[in-house]
Image (cartoon, helix red, strand yellow):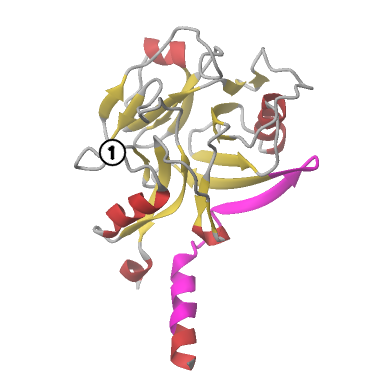
Amino acid sequence: MARTLSAIAALLFWAAPAQAECSRTNYLDQRFTICEATAGDDLRLFLRDGDGQTYGSFATIDTALARDGKVLSFAMNGGMYHPDRAPVGLYIEDNTEAARLILSEGPGNFGLLPNGVFCIEETRLTIIESRAFALARPACRHATQSGPMLVIDGVYHPRFVEHSDSRLIRNGVGVSADGQRAVFVISDSAVNLWEFARFFRDHLGLSQALYIDGRVSRLHAPALGRSDWGLPLGPIIGKVVDAPSARQ
């Protein structure tokens, strides 16, 4: 029995990151969970496996990563998608563009311009307004387009309404001004877009932030004992680390 407990304790020790990547916080009576990544981390987008099958879940990705001794440190849905789970807007995975950039205004949150692109470069993590991205495309190893922008150069999206009654569990991402840090956020209480943008700008101090989704927002954060489930997802974004056994 003692040996079993020791083994479990060792596994928990190795499974936990050296610094807490994910944490829960309250801001103005609203609840949020945040996960952080830095430039140079193995941050990836996932859509389909080598056989062309859509991953659809965090567990499926973990199973695939296990073959290489890897695991998801954290992950969340990584972009809006069509009924067949194909990405809406620009999608780049491992330097391969699978869906094109969309610049036109349209229905829904995605088409509420300005929208933007979250870009993972070799040494930077950036969020760029879509039309600016089209003019000077950076070398994104991974990228996902979504919308609307939540915060643009420190200013809220111009069409947000402070007292809107459109409240959902929402997720998004913000980046630091130096491009060295990305903060992924999911609201644990229903918020409107103005309130969600306020959290990124006023609480996290981030001048660029991008909305990812609302109705399907889900988070995988093993260190917090959390892995949301539901209908199959389209794009998923996650940080990859060595599996516990590979670190021993």
Viewer-closest of 8 and 173: 8
Q: Residue 40 lies in what quarter of the image? A: top left
Rendered residue at 43%/9% (across/down): 103
Q: Is residue 202 left or right of residue 62?
A: right
Rendered residue at 29%/59% (across/down): 66
Rendered residue at 20%/42% (across/down): 50
Categorize mark 1 by other alpha carbons within 10 Å: few (<14), some (14-19), many (20+).
Answer: some
Q: Is residue 159 left or right of residue 70?
A: right
Magenta residue check for 8: yes
Name the kind of residue labelled 1 in the image: Arg
Q: Position of residue 165 (x, y in %)?
A: 75, 24
Q: Residue 204 lies in what quarter of the image? A: top right
Viewer-closest of 12 and 231: 231
Viewer-closest of 189 and 16: 189
Q: Position of residue 236 (x, y in %)?
A: 41, 39
Viewer-closest of 161 and 39: 161
Residue 175 appears in the picture as rendered: no
Rendered residue at 72%/32% (across/down): 202
Quadrant assignment for the C terminus:
bottom left
Position of residue 134 relative to residue 248, above or below, is above
| Residue at disc 1, secondary structure | loop
Q: Position of residue 159 (x, y in %)?
A: 67, 13
Residue position marked by numbered label 1 in the rendering: 48
Residue 199 appears in the picture as rendered: yes
Residue range corresponding to the magenta coloring: 7-31
